[in-house]
């Protein structure tokens, strides 16, 4: 089995991309990833819904931004290809949409290049969020994305994978700085209002040897929107209620936007919001 994978793929340590794939019902994961997920699920069962709600949020958010006429998407921390990838969603709304996927995990890069990269309207870049200009100036990006026109920058369920000393919010901000007015940011981040629960998850994931940042508070995660204007979290653009919400409720056709899950026993969720650069 090891022969099927490039040598830089570590099959003995759980990877966030493969664990997330397992939670979404995918097949691109190893025993070590499944065991790690089950350790988390035993203590924090909401992790399963959180992953699936996050992916559904990504779809709604890409539909929303594409419907605003944005044609270029830079999907950072894209994850393993799944049933409905960003370019599928964006191109349903706008057949001319172009997507550059970026991820630092070698197995994601291998699958992404094989399954997604067509070199014309989609490309895959094996790079780290913290590469900054190295992302925007990479030939793959420059071929498909013109930063003089609005871009949708996606950091969905990504920044909690990066520790504070990697300055994930600074890295995101420096990419936003280079984008044209009318650009959008699609964002979600794993947050908690129970610091002990957040620390437990963070320490558990780090104990697997998996590269990871930490669960943060909503207030910390809101740094992603500095200088940006948040869109309404309602499908009808209503100007009331929170704009950064539990991802399960962001522009959901049948749910009102809620800042956190209604069940007080659920203390971990993906805080989500979409913002525009004016
Ligand atoms: C939880 S998955 C989210 C996938 C997708 N964005 C979604 O929300 O469905 C996080 C992804 O970020 C990638 N990742 C983690 N740290 C990264 C970094 N520093 N630079 C680029 N990608 C990173 C992981 O490899 C993984 O594929």
Image: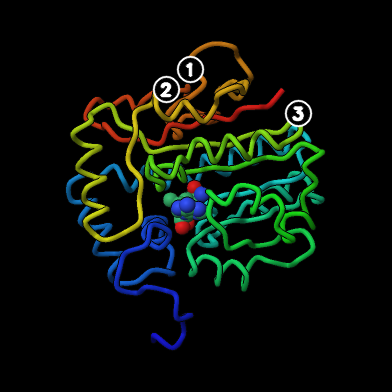
Q: Percent x, y for residue 121?
A: 77, 58
Among the two numbered marks 2 and 1 on one chain, the one whose residue lies closer to the N terminus: 1
Q: Residues within 10 Å of mark 2 (few under 14, many from 20)?
A: some
Q: Residues within 10 Å of mark 3 (few under 14, many from 20)?
A: some
- Give me the C-alpha separation between circle 2 and circle 1: 7 Å
Name the colour scheme. rainbow
According to the image, label 2 marks what residue? 258
Foreground: 213 or 54?
213
According to the image, label 1 marks what residue? 242
Q: Percent x, y for residue 118?
A: 73, 67
Closer to us: mark 3 or mark 2? Answer: 3
- Left or right: where 201 falls relative to 26: left
- Left or right: where 243 falls relative to 53: right
Say whether marks 1 and 3 touch (CB < 8 Å): no
Q: Residue at x 54, y 11 (%)?
A: 240
According to the image, label 3 marks what residue? 181
Say whether marks 2 and 1 touch (CB < 8 Å): yes
Quadrant (top left, top right, bottom left, bottom right) of the C terminus: top right
Among the two numbered marks 3 and 2 on one chain, the one whose residue lies closer to the N terminus: 3
Closer to us: mark 2 or mark 1? Answer: 1
């Amino acid at each position: 089995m090891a022969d099927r994978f490039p040598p830089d793929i570590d099959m003995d340590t759980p990877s966030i991309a493969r664990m997330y794939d397992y939670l979404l019902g995918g097949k691109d994961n190893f025993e070590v990833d499944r065991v790690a997920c089950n350790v988390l699920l035993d203590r924090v069962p909401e992790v399963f819904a959180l992953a699936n709600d996050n992916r559904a949020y990504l779809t709604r958010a890409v539909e929303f931004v594409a419907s605003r006429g944005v044609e270029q998407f830079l999907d950072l921390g894209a994850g393993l290809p799944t049933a409905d990838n960003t370019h599928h969603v964006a191109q349903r709304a706008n057949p001319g949409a172009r997507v550059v996927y970026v991820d630092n995990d070698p197995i994601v890069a291998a699958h992404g290049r094989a399954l997604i990269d067509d070199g014309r309207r989609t490309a895959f870049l094996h790079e780290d969020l913290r590469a900054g200009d190295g992302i925007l100036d990479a030939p793959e990006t420059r071929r498909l994305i013109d930063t003089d026109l609005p871009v949708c920058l996606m950091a969905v369920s990504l920044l909690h994978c990066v520790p504070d000393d990697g300055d994930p919010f600074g890295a995101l901000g420096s990419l936003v700085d280079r984008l044209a007015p009318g650009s959008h940011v699609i964002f979600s981040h794993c947050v908690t209002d129970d610091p002990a629960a957040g620390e437990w998850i963070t320490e558990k994931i780090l104990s697997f040897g998996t590269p990871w940042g930490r669960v943060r508070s909503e207030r910390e995660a809101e740094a992603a929107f500095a200088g940006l204007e948040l869109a309404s979290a309602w499908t009808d653009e209503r100007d009331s209620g929170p704009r950064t919400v539990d991802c399960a409720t962001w522009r959901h056709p049948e749910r009102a936007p809620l800042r956190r899950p209604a069940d007080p026993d659920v203390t971990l969720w993906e805080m989500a919001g979409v913002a525009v650069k004016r």
